[in-house]
Image (cartoon, rainbow, N blue to C red):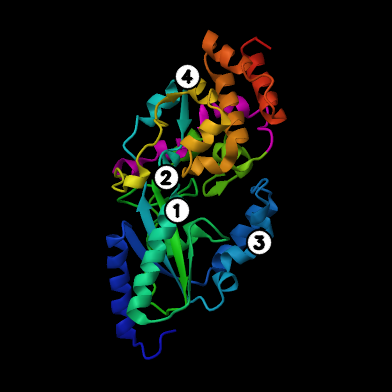
């Protein structure tokens, strides 16, 4: 707490922080109270049903996710920030409809958002420190047990959609969230109301039925989980449903009516790299591990590693229209050093009657 700060000073500081945030490239900044007790029952129920899958850290952190003061002692408020990421790219629907192409979630087509947002949030914290002196804070970008969507809704940045993602009237859901936990007693913003109404398009569009009810996601069936978080074999019964989605899935966002308001991101770091918005499965499957590391360095995709990337591509090729080049690409890696990759290649070849 900064000594000698009045309520009026804190209001002025909160307004200035929002201006600084926009100057640093955020589209919106809000302030939330750190009391998330009301979110604890829902978090516990989600964990008890095992919906977190192999994301053991979710269970390990438990209620700490809903208790900011346990994560960062002294936290009074959370400064939340939103940054749009939608790049100018080949139409997602066109890529998804072409079984020879590889679909990569729109958020992963450019630079790793962790790096971008963390740097901007730190810059924002530095500006605050320059203005008020030393203060307690910690910056987060999807990097710790933080209830990001809950905090975003409390900070007035949007509301939780039925697909469990945050939604904003002027931006849809194509944005990243980041937080600064702080001991500054800033005035908290009012939450905004939900505006999904009776719409359930996101539930109907989910390829694997992972959105089991409004506001409830079973990660074990979610294609984003299967292609990113899951370290082992993708369940055989779900592989055909994955289609050509090799990193993440945007289907629930693609059908959301609010995303007609999403803006193409102005941030240069989120521009498409390596032509990943419109590339064939065969081409990507032909990359060596050296290619993967050099071409995807600095990308969010890089963190899953070459083995899982190859596993995902093998599934995509198994779901692709049967063609000579598809079978040839799979056979070229039938004896891959990775048992995980070999398993998925064998499955894919069997799909084409070429086992």
Q: Residue at x 61, y 16 (%)?
A: 332
Q: Image point 40% across, 63% down: which residue?
A: 121
| Within-10-Å neighbours for mark 3: few <14, some 14–19, many 20+ | some
> Can you give x and y, in whole percent of width and height, for residue 288 in the image?
56, 28
Which residue is drawn at the image coordinates 69% and 27% (left, top)? 337
In 3D space, how far apart are the residues under numbered discs 3 and 1 (Cα atoms)? 26 Å
Task: Give yes or no for contact between labels 4 and 3 (Cβ–Cβ under 8 Å).
Answer: no
Q: Secondary structure at mark 4?
A: loop
Query: Mark 2 and 3 residues: CB-CB less than 8 Å, in contact?
Result: no
The mark found on residue 288 in the picture is none
Q: Are marks 1 and 2 in contact (CB under 8 Å)?
A: yes
Magenta-drawn stretch contains 253: yes
Residue at the spot of label 1? 115
Q: Is residue 227 above or below residue 167?
A: above
Residue bearing the label numbered 2: 111
**Residue 264 position in % (x across, y down):** 30, 43
Sequence-wise first label, 4 or 1: 4
Which of the two discs, 2 and 3, sits closer to the camera?
Answer: 2
Q: Is tag 2's residue or tag 3's residue first in the polypeptide sequence?
A: 3
Q: Nearer the viewer, mark 3 or mark 1?
A: 1
Return the residue at label 4.
Answer: 100
- Highlighted magenta segment, given as a residue range: 232-261
Q: What SS does tag 3 mark?
A: helix
The alpha-carbon separation of the residues under discs 4 and 2 comes to 25 Å
Q: Is residue 64 left or right of residue 251?
A: right
Residue 167 appearing in the image: yes
The residue where tag 3 is placed is 62
CA separation in Å, label 2 and label 3: 30 Å
CA distance separating discs 1 and 2:
8 Å
């Amino acid at each position: 707490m900064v000594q000698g700060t009045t309520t009026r000073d804190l209001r002025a500081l909160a307004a200035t922080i929002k201006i600084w945030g926009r100057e640093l490239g955020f589209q919106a900044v809000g302030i939330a109270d750190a009391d998330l007790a009301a979110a604890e029952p829902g978090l516990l129920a989600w964990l008890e049903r095992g919906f977190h899958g192999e994301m053991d850290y979710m269970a390990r952190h438990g209620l700490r996710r809903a208790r900011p003061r346990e994560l960062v002692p002294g936290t009074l408020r959370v400064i939340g920030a939103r940054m749009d990421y939608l790049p100018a790219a080949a139409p997602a629907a066109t890529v998804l409809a072409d079984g020879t192409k590889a679909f990569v979630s729109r958020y992963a087509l450019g630079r790793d958002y962790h790096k971008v947002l963390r740097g901007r949030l730190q810059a924002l914290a530095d500006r605050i420190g320059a203005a008020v002196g030393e203060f307690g804070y910690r910056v987060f970008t999807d990097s710790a047990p933080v209830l990001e969507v809950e905090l975003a809704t409390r900070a007035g940045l949007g509301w939780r959609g039925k697909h469990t993602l945050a939604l904003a009237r002027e931006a849809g859901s194509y944005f990243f969230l980041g937080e600064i936990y702080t001991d500054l007693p800033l005035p908290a913003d009012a939450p905004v109301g939900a505006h999904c109404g009776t719409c359930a398009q996101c539930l109907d569009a989910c390829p694997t039925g992972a959105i089991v009810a409004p506001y409830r996601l079973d990660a074990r069936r979610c294609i984003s989980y299967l292609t990113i978080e899951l370290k082992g074999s993708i369940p055989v019964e779900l592989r055909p449903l994955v289609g050509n989605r090799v990193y993440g899935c945007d289907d629930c966002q693609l059908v959301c009516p609010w995303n007609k308001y999403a803006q193409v991101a102005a941030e240069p770091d989120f521009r498409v790299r390596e032509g990943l918005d419109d590339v064939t499965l065969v081409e990507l499957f032909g990359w060596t591990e050296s290619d993967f590391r050099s071409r995807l360095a600095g990308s969010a995709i890089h963190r899953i590693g070459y083995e899982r990337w190859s596993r995902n591509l093998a599934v995509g090729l198994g779901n692709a229209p049967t063609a000579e080049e598809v079978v040839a690409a799979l056979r070229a890696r039938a004896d891959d050093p990775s048992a995980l990759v070999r398993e998925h290649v064998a499955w894919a070849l069997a799909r084409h009657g070429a086992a």
